[in-house]
Image (cartoon, grey):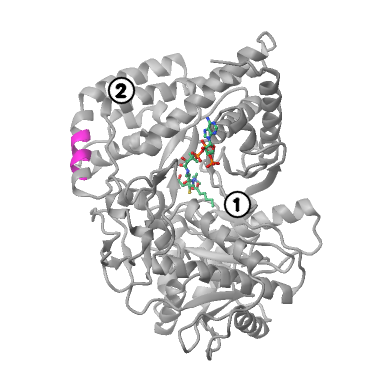
Amino acid sequence: MTMSLLIKNTLSPRAGKVLVGMSSKMRRPSGRMFSIQDSLPRLPVPQLDVTLQKYLRCITPLCTAEEFKKTQKIVEEFRRDPGPKLQQLLEQRAQKNINWLSDWWKNLAYLEVRSPVPINSNPGVIFPRQNYSGTDSMITYAAKIVSGALDYKKMIDSGDLPVEQLGGKPLCMMQYYQILNGCRIPGEKIDSHVCFPPTSENPPRHIIVIHNNQFFSLDVHSSDGKLLNEDQLRNQLKNIVNQSQQVAPALGILTMWDRPSWAKTYNKIIQDKHNKKLMEDIQRSIFVLCLDKSRPDLSQEEARIFAAEQMLHGGGSQLNSANRWFDKTLQFMIGSEGTSGLNYEHTTAEGPPIAAMMDHILTYCEKNTGPSSPAGGMSDARKLDFTLNNDILDDIEKAKEATEKFIHSVSVRVFTYSGYGKNFPKTQKLSPDAYIQTALQLAYFRLYGKTCATYESASLRRFQLGRTDTIRSCSIDSLNFTRAMDDSSLTNSVKADLFRQAVLAHRKYTDETINGRGIDRHLLGLKLSALEANLDVPELHKDPSYSQAFHFKLSTSQVATHHEGVMVFGPVVPDGYGLCYNPQETKIHFGVSTYTSCPDTDSNKLGVALMKSFDDLRDLLASTPQAKL
Ligand code: COA
Ligand code: HC5
């Protein structure tokens, strides 16, 4: 296949810039990874009537009868005007662009958002705990992880990754191409993102290593162009650790700050030409490796929470929050007490490509027993000696203060349910994902006596440049079931039937969504079409039912891995939960987060309630083997 243009989709006037190296063109390698890319379908615009009808169904369990009546009227009005006009504008956009949604989404969901990126946007992934302790072992394991990541990079660079599939259909592989060599850059109004792909002129050859808040640039290639082997990497990392025994000013904490504040300080930093070059070193690097402080004195349970915090936000400026560059698309963290994991900046990719990379790295670490043949001469790591004047140091202190508050506002818990995994729902001929989501609805209902708008990420990667849409897990069917489950006047057989019905409804909604017939992005597209045409925001989008429907107290996502990874991300509303789950064949791992400022949420309680739901559902289904619909 010849090299062809990539990324180019549309240039919306409001778009935050996605800069690609020094040129506006990005090429992709030949190889099987992109073999079907151009034949993938384009994201369709759903039919207006269908979306509006579905919208009314979705808000039914969320609003009162009176609110529903009002909304029904607003929807009818919208169906006549301005709905059709906006639909037409959206269809025109879809004609002109490979993907009508992806640029809008990149800006709206990421680059325009002004709150700090960690917790709010960047997810953390906790790798399985290793049985080692001490700095030397940390360095040895870090060298393995780096080596595994570079091994994966080879496949990305050559375009040799197999095309990922979902439900037997091929997926767009563009995201894989943007998880390395990339970085977000703060802007006062809107951020930008840079990516230096392997096909660009002079592609990146180095990683950034951070230890004790000090930054080093490490070329991971030898003079003959080969990748450094594990021994060489270990020696280099050892040298870096030896050179950075003192804790440096907390420069990295700035990437935890709100974006406008960080952007102001960033502009001050890069006024110095040398600093600007160093910033570019970070932005251009393949990825960041953080060699972290650890706490050896923790119980097993405390260590799990520590690890979750380490990956999500670094645990505060005294621990590892300044030993980070949260703008970097990918950073690995390794601690001295067996903890490791990663954090990634979300602008260019969803969880599955990151999860696939994690699996590759961990398999590599397990299999790889010794170093490959030594590469040629290598250059020593270079310390990035930023010049930080008093003004910048003051900003760092302010960012520290804000960060401490921010970090303490979040509670995160990690769970592993060992009763069963995907295997049990499968024996019941039920979709495991839909089963888990319905169990979560039950857990929430049991805690609150009501339901809430629930978001589950659905992949749109069946389409070119596809990102996500929403599976609305709270449905009329899920509420029918959750209300019935603890009703002692109903038989188990009735409850099991209602459960199955809810699971089927969820799976049907999933199928519609991943095939481009979701309602959330469509409704968003209609609103943005109005704004771009200088029309008023439609009444439909100003209606309290709409706000209610988009106030996702449960923000959830499934990211599956073969290895025992647990993922965590923050809630999207102050009174909500973030919940990421990893269903394996015989276990379900999940991470839950809440804001401590909200007296009504409790990450531990929700986790425990979810595990009880899993137990109770198994018992329910086991007691009603004849259950039929
Ligand atoms: N009976 C028996 N088995 C069934 C079944 C049934 N009724 N329904 C599904 N299964 C099987 C599937 O064949 C599949 O088998 P596998 O384990 O061999 O692959 C397995 O159960 C899982 O299917 P299911 O649980 O239905 O979910 P899914 O894998 O189709 O995933 C989503 C559902 C929503 C998670 C997926 O469509 C998606 O969008 N994933 C991406 C989400 C994402 O991007 N998250 C990160 C955002 S940053
Ligand atoms: C490694 C786990 C990453 C999961 C991240 C994720 O699910 O992000 C969602 C992206 C999207 O577009 O649905 C957003 N969410 C965290 C708010 C669910």
For residue 153, above or below residue 431: below
Residue 62 image position (x, y, % from top left)? 48, 23
* Numbered label tally: 2
Q: Residue furthest top?
A: 489
Q: Which residues are magenta?
A: 86-93
**Which residue is painted at 52% across and 84% down in the image?**
385
Q: Would you identify the image quadrant in which residue 361 lies?
A: bottom right
Residue 136 image position (x, y, % from top left)? 73, 77
92 inside magenta stretch: yes
The quadrant of the rendering that contains the N terminus is: bottom left
**Which residue is painted at 58% across and 65% down in the image?**
332
Q: Is residue 38 left or right of residue 557?
A: left
Task: Name the secondary structure under disc 2.
Answer: helix
Front-most of 430 and 580?
Answer: 430
* Dot 1 alpha-carbon crowd within 10 angstroms: few under 14, some 14 to 19, many 20 or more: some
Residue 559 image position (x, y, % from top left)? 54, 47
The amino acid type, in three-letter code, at marker 1 is: His
Q: Would you identify the image quadrant in which residue 276 lies?
A: bottom left
Could you tell me if residue 4 is visible in this image?
A: yes
Residue beneath disc 2 = 75
Q: Is residue 201 left or right of residue 343?
A: left
Residue beneath disc 1 = 562
Residue 272 image position (x, y, % from top left)? 41, 82
For residue 519, above or below residue 593: above
Give the main secondary structure of the magenta stretch.
helix
